[in-house]
Image: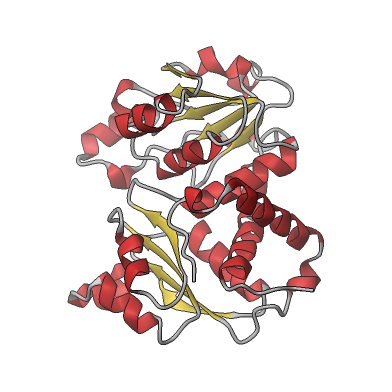
Amino acid sequence: MRHLMNPLDLSVEELDQLLDLANDIEAHPSRYAHSCEGKKLATLFYEPSTRTRLSFEAAMLNLGGSVLGFSSADSSSAAKGESVSDTIRVISCYADICAMRHPKEGAPLVASMKSSIPVINAGDGGHQHPTQTLTDLLTIRSLKGRLGDFTIGLCGDLKFGRTVHSLIQALIRYQNVHFVLISPEELRLPDSIRDGVLRKNNQVFREEVRLEDAIPELDLLYMTRVQRERFFNEEDYIRMKDFYILDREKMKLAKEDMLVLHPLPRVNEISTEVDDDPRAVYFKQAQYGVYVRMALILTLLEVKVC
C-alpha cells in the first residue's frame, strides 16, 4: 500500500506513467467509467476547498466509485476533539482511499502512519500540495509538450504558498529549468526551499520584486494569491494583497507563447480581462486536475484498466 504525501514520493518514471495515464483518461474517458465501481473515496477536509475537494469527488465519480466525507473541521468529530489518528482509523473501516486537507503541516503524514487505506495529502498548511503539483505538471507537459528546457516565473506569495514549494521540488528533477522568484521581501521563498532545495541542487534561479522586469523572458508564469488565512494580522494582509496584478498591459510584455497558470482561487492578482487571452490556461488547468486525480486514484488502488 502506498500513500502520496509529497510529489517526490513518485519517481520521475512513475510520474511519467501517471501523466501518460491522465492523458489517456482525457482521450478515452468511457474506457475508465466503471473502473472503480464498488470503491469509496473519503474526503477529509479540515479547511475550506472548492477545486481540490470537488475535483477529487468528480474524479472518483467519473471512475464509477462513490464519495463520503466532510468539508470542514466543524462538521466532523474534530470539533469534539477527536485526533487525526483516531479519525483515520475509523475512516479506514468505511472507505478504500482517502484524500485529506489539514491546516497543520504533517497531519496527513500522521494519518498515513495509522491508516490501513492509501492516504493522499490534499494540502497541509503551507507545506505541500502534491496533487496540485501533479496537475501543474500535467498542464505544462500537455500544453508545452515537455517538462524541462524553460524559464518559469513564480509570482506572489512564495513564503506560504504550498503549491509553489511542491512545484519547485518537482521541477528540479528535470533538465534546464530556470526559476525566477517574483515576490515582495515579506513573502520571499523560505530558506528551507531557497537553500535546502534550489541551492542544494545547484539550480539556476534569481529573485525579482517587479513582475514587469521578469515577464519578458518567461515561458511560464505561475501566479499565486496572497493567502489571507496564512497571515497573523489583517493589516499585513491588506498591505500585501494587491502587490501584484497581472493585467492586459503586463501581458503585452510577455512572449506570444507564454502560458499563465494559477492554482486558484484568484482574488485580485489576475485581472478578468486576461481570461480571454489564449495564453491564460488556469481554467484548463483545473480540468487537468480531474484527470490527474483519476489517474492517481487508479494508481494507488492498483486498478488495472484493459
Residue 82 in the figure: left or right of residue 291: left
Q: Residue at x 63, y 65 (%)?
A: 294
Residue 184 location, x and y as percent?
Answer: 35, 22
The x and y percentages for residue 177 are 59, 27
Q: Is residue 191 left or right of residue 235?
A: right
- Residue at figure coordinates x 40%, y 65% from the top left: 100
Query: Which residue occupies 43% across, 28% down?
Result: 198
Q: Residue 166 placed where, x, y %?
A: 46, 43
Left or right of residue 306, residue 116 in this image: left
> Residue at (69%, 20%) from the top-left corner?
255
| Picture mark count | 0
Please indicate whether residue 30 sits to the left or right of residue 70 in the image.
Answer: right
Q: Nearer the viewer, residue 261 or 122?
A: 122
From the viewer's perspective, is residue 97 above or below residue 15? Answer: below
Instruction: Give the vertical position of 197 relative to 5 (above or below).
Output: above
Does 194 appear above or below 170?
above
